[in-house]
Image (cartoon, rainbow, N blue to C red):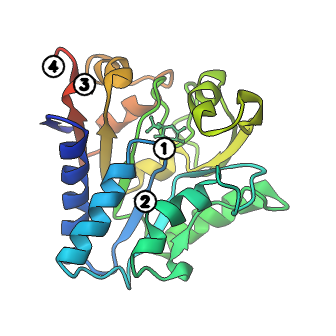
Amino acid sequence: MKIVYVKDYDALSEAGASILLEHIKAKPSLTMGLATGGTPKGTYEKLINMSEQEKVSFEQVRTFNLDEYVGLSKEDPNSYHHYMKGMLFNHINIQSTHTFIPNGEAASIELECQDYEQRIKAEGGIDIQLLGIGNNGHIGFNEPGTDFSETTHMVELADATREANARYFNAKEDVPKQAITMGIASIMAAKEILLLISGKDKQHAFSTLIEGGIDQAFPASILKEHPRVTVIVDRDAAGQY
Ligand code: GLP
């Protein structure tokens, strides 16, 4: 893992966006894996501004999102479909047929998971996967204990995750109990991975990633086995490091 230390969230967002932009310049038909949550918001904002300034087109870019809540409609303000449109897709010239997010309202969630995995393969796999990290080490919605061999599947969300995400909902009870997520094996199949870690809340997650061994109890630890991972961490999250 290559670790890049930056001073704050703004610098982290700029560094993240620069890496993504360089990849699109090098390969205009790039397939990007995207993440939601608070952490990548700044990266998307910078990506929109930088691509405008540098006249970089998303015309041929494909995107696959990591996850989506089960049971929320695409229009629900808390769905990741809604998040992605607001944070990125509505502001760039990406084709709507090129953006993929699991459908949390599918009649058969099992079929949806299989189809999603197939679609990633049909598009040639993910060139670069953007990731955030949960306090408990989850990536996507792969909670502690998830088998590393899992591909896209449905998960029961950990209480800690529902609590952490309750800030976006009216009440914790409104946070869905299930989600569809790309599995650890789907994430590890990406050719390159970019993990963003920001804020004091993530100090423990960062130190566990650095100090701990590879363990299903801390899903992000598997990233140590991937040959091309860049971790961008700001001073708040890096703590003593
Ligand atoms: C969410 C998402 C993850 C995200 C993580 C951290 O539950 N499913 O993809 O990385 O939690 O979110 P945040 O960046 O808001 O701390």
Mark 3 in CB contact with mark 2 (< 8 angstroms): no
The structure residue drawn at horizontal position 48% and vertical position 73%, both measured from the top left corner, is 90
C-alpha distance separating marks 1 and 4:
24 Å
N-terminal label among 1 and 3: 1
10 Å neighbourhood of mark 1: few (<14), some, or many (≥20)? some
N-terminal label among 2 and 4: 2
Q: Nearer the viewer, mark 1 or mark 4?
A: 1
C-alpha distance separating marks 3 and 2:
26 Å
Residue bearing mark 1:
37
Q: Nearer the viewer, mark 2 or mark 1?
A: 1
Q: Which mark is residue 241?
A: 4
The structure residue drawn at horizontal position 23% and vertical position 40%, both measured from the top left corner, is 232
10 Å neighbourhood of mark 2: few (<14), some, or many (≥20)? many
Some atom of ligand 1 lies within 8 Å of the CB belonging to the residue at label 1:
yes
Question: Residue reaching furthest right?
Answer: 107
Q: Is residue 231 above or below residue 87?
A: above
| Residue 59 picture quarter | bottom left
Circle 1 — which element? loop
C-alpha distance separating marks 1 and 3:
18 Å
Question: Residue reaching furthest front?
Answer: 170
The structure residue drawn at horizontal position 34% and vertical position 64%, both measured from the top left corner, is 127
Some atom of ligand 1 lies within 8 Å of the CB belonging to the residue at label 3:
no
Which quadrant of the figure contains the N terminus?
A: top left
Q: Which mark is residue 33?
A: 2
